[in-house]
Image (spheres, rainbow, N blue to C red):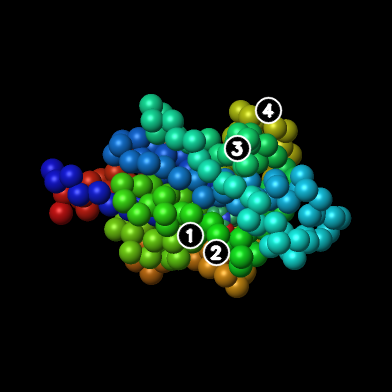
Amino acid sequence: MSSRKITIAVDGYSACGKSTLARALATQLNYNYVDTGAMYRAITLYAIRNGLINGKDLDVESLNEQLDDIDIQFEFNEASKSSMILLNDENVESQIRQMDVNDWVSQVSAVPEVRRKMVTLQQKMGKEKGIAMDGRDIGTTVFPDAELKLFMTAEIGVRTNRRIAEMKAKNIPGDFEQVKTNLLQRDKEDMSRKESPLRKADNAIILDNTNLTRDEQLNFALSKALELISK
Ligand code: DC
């Protein structure tokens, strides 16, 4: 097998298991993994903490003014090939999964200046290839030339239960109807924003994992990746 490194873009709806699959692919291939949703979540946490969200409004002007004060970095753990997100040097990996962040992240990630800053960072992280990155616009905007693009989808009930289980593992309570409404609302906002909306890249492979186990998804995606790597 050649040692050619590729770029893997995993996009799709909220709570479809994009991170789980992208992380597992990175582990198998000895690639880096980047969770771009965590980056938008960290900026949202910053906005909440700094009073930029008042009632129903996001103060976009102040957020844009403060963008240079927001430092987002990942601390890579070589052994696990996973990463912790740092917001201005603080590990906020668990705070960014809270419900208040869920409620605001689509609005924050629709701000063009926020997206531009994040996309530039993401492109830097992937410039050497050998990366699996998950998000909403990876195959369309961040890495339009990615060799492997996957677009994930699953039934909403399955996605809701998966998200609740994920929250529970982090000791965050989650009500089924509230979580389901949030997922549907976020998908709608992510698909309808002007700047790089969520959409399937023309050459992405659709992966509906409603009835697939994690191993089945990984085997499918890994075989596609290995095919491309050995070309
Ligand atoms: O993957 P996630 O659920 O953690 O993402 C949180 C939000 O961030 C999602 O509702 C949309 C936004 N997002 C985005 O706009 N672009 C990305 N590349 C990744 C996430």
Looking at the image, is mark 4 or mark 1 nearer the viewer?
Answer: 1
Q: In the rendered image, is residue 181 in sight?
A: no
- Asked whether disc 1 touches disc 2, contact meaning CB atoms under 8 Å apart, the reply is yes
Looking at the image, is mark 4 or mark 2 nearer the viewer?
Answer: 2
**What residue is shown with label 2?**
116
Give the alpha-carbon distance from disc 4 to disc 3, as whole Å. Answer: 23 Å
Residue at the far bottom: name it. 194
Pick the front one: 161 or 82: 82
Query: Ligand 1 closer than 8 Å to the CB at disc 3?
Result: no
Q: Is residue 62 above or below residue 126?
A: below
Q: Which mark is residue 89?
A: 3
Q: Is residue 174 above or below residue 135?
A: above
- Residue drawn 61% across the image and 60% down it: 114
Looking at the image, is mark 4 or mark 3 nearer the viewer?
Answer: 3
Give the alpha-carbon distance from disc 1 to disc 2, as whole Å. Answer: 6 Å
**What residue is shown with label 1?**
120
Q: Earlier in the sequence, mark 3 or mark 1?
A: 3
SS at circle 4: loop
Give the alpha-carbon distance from disc 2 to disc 3, as whole Å. Answer: 21 Å
Q: Is residue 50 above or below residue 214?
A: below
Q: Amino acid at mark 4?
A: Asn
Q: Amino acid at mark 2?
A: Arg
Mark 1, residues whose alpha carbon is within 10 Å: few (<14), some, or many (≥20)?
Answer: few
Give the alpha-carbon distance from disc 4 to disc 1, as whole Å. Answer: 33 Å
- Asked whether disc 4 touches disc 2, contact meaning CB atoms under 8 Å apart, the reply is no
- Residue drawn 74% across the image and 39% down it: 175
**What residue is shown with label 4?**
171
Q: Earlier in the sequence, mark 2 or mark 3?
A: 3
- Residue drawn 31% across the image and 47% down it: 130
- Asked whether disc 4 touches disc 3, contact meaning CB atoms under 8 Å apart, the reply is no
Looking at the image, is mark 3 or mark 1 nearer the viewer?
Answer: 3
